[in-house]
Image (tube, grey):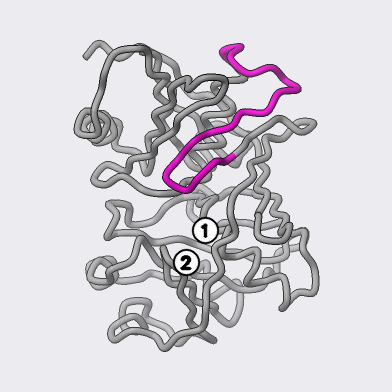
């Protein structure tokens, strides 16, 4: 079984978000085996993809849990399929996942994903969240996966140093922090912390933008955005809100390819 490490949402190696992509063969493997491989890879996500009729089945694992939706590892999967000749340059890959059918395709020099919007609704900050973040937010919202916390400005986002041990106590996948961008060329910035899912800070989180697009659309008066995830590695996303769907587009770079021997 071939396995790749691919940096997603970047056009340069060692930036963006690294994901492992495992192209499964016909051997029977179960979730515990996939979890073990993901722990061995020790990246924020490892994707497992297998042909399913004319489509593909796709699952994602952090080093400690399976997740229901992941953007950067899906983008990395499309990149691997294109490089391996398993997806034609003008073709569309349909993935059957825990979040329903998702698609990915090449659009010019980008890979574009079609994902469900995940609207976050206003809520009171849970006890300990402000303490964990170490700063006062503008507002707090929540969807089925994450808390979404708006900060005053981009400097607040970049300088944030949360207490991961406190964040780990919350029964959510993670915490998205965001603000309007002050960096030219971008509409909003964000970071994503998920210590409860085994990832203290995820470098670039496509699925978080499924919440960020519908959040920022009414505030910025637009539906197409350039977004920057301001982690130490950094990543760039083109994000489009289309009704109840979000299109996520970016580039990817293969760092290595190999074979699983177990």
Mark 1, other Cα within 10 Å: few <14 / some 14–19 / many ≥20: many
**Residue 117 screen position, x and y as percent:** 59, 59
**Residue 174 screen position, x and y as percent:** 38, 63
Q: CA distance from mark 2 to mark 1?
A: 7 Å
**Residue 189 screen position, x and y as percent:** 61, 64
Mark with earlier residue (2, 1): 2
Image-quadrant location for residue 219: bottom right
Residue matched to label 1: 208
Residue matched to label 2: 176
In the rendered structure, the answer to whether residue 111 lies left or right of residue 260 reads: right
Q: Secondary structure at mark 1?
A: loop
Q: Residue drawn at (65%, 36%), measured in percent from left and top?
A: 251
> What span is colored magenta in the figure?
84-102
Q: Residue drawn at (39%, 29%), measured in percent from left and top?
A: 48
Residue contact at pointers 2 and 1, CB within 8 angstroms: yes
In the rendered structure, the answer to whether residue 151 lies left or right of residue 247 reads: left
Residue nearer the viewer, 1 or 235: 1
User: Label for residue 132?
Assistant: none
Is residue 95 located in the magenta-colored stretch of the structure? yes
Q: Which quadrant of the rendered structure holds the C terminus? A: top left
């Amino acid at each position: 079984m071939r396995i790749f490490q691919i940096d997603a949402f970047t056009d340069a190696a060692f930036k963006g978000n690294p994901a492992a992509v495992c192209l499964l063969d016909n051997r029977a493997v179960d979730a515990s085996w996939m979890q073990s491989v993901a722990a061995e890879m020790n990246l924020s996500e490892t994707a497992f993809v297998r042909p399913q009729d004319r489509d593909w089945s796709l699952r994602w694992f952090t080093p400690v849990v399976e997740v229901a939706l992941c953007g950067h590892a899906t983008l990395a999967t499309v990149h691997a399929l294109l490089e391996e000749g398993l997806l034609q340059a003008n073709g569309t890959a349909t993935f059957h996942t825990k979040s329903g059918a998702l698609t990915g395709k090449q659009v010019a020099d980008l890979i574009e994903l079609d994902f469900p919007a995940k609207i976050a609704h206003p809520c009171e900050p849970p006890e300990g969240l402000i303490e964990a973040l170490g700063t006062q937010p503008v507002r707090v919202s929540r969807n089925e996966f994450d808390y979404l916390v708006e900060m005053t400005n981009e400097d607040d986002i970049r300088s944030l140093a949360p207490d991961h041990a406190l964040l780990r106590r919350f029964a959510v996948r993670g915490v998205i922090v965001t603000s309007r961008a002050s960096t030219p060329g971008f509409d909003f910035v964000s970071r994503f912390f998920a210590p409860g899912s085994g990832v203290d800070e995820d470098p670039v989180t496509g699925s978080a933008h499924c919440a960020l697009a519908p959040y920022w659309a009414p505030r910025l008066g637009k539906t197409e955005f350039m977004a920057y995830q301001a982690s130490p590695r950094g990543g760039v996303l083109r994000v489009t809100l289309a009704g109840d769907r979000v299109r996520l587009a970016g580039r990817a770079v293969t760092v290595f390819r190999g074979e699983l021997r177990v």
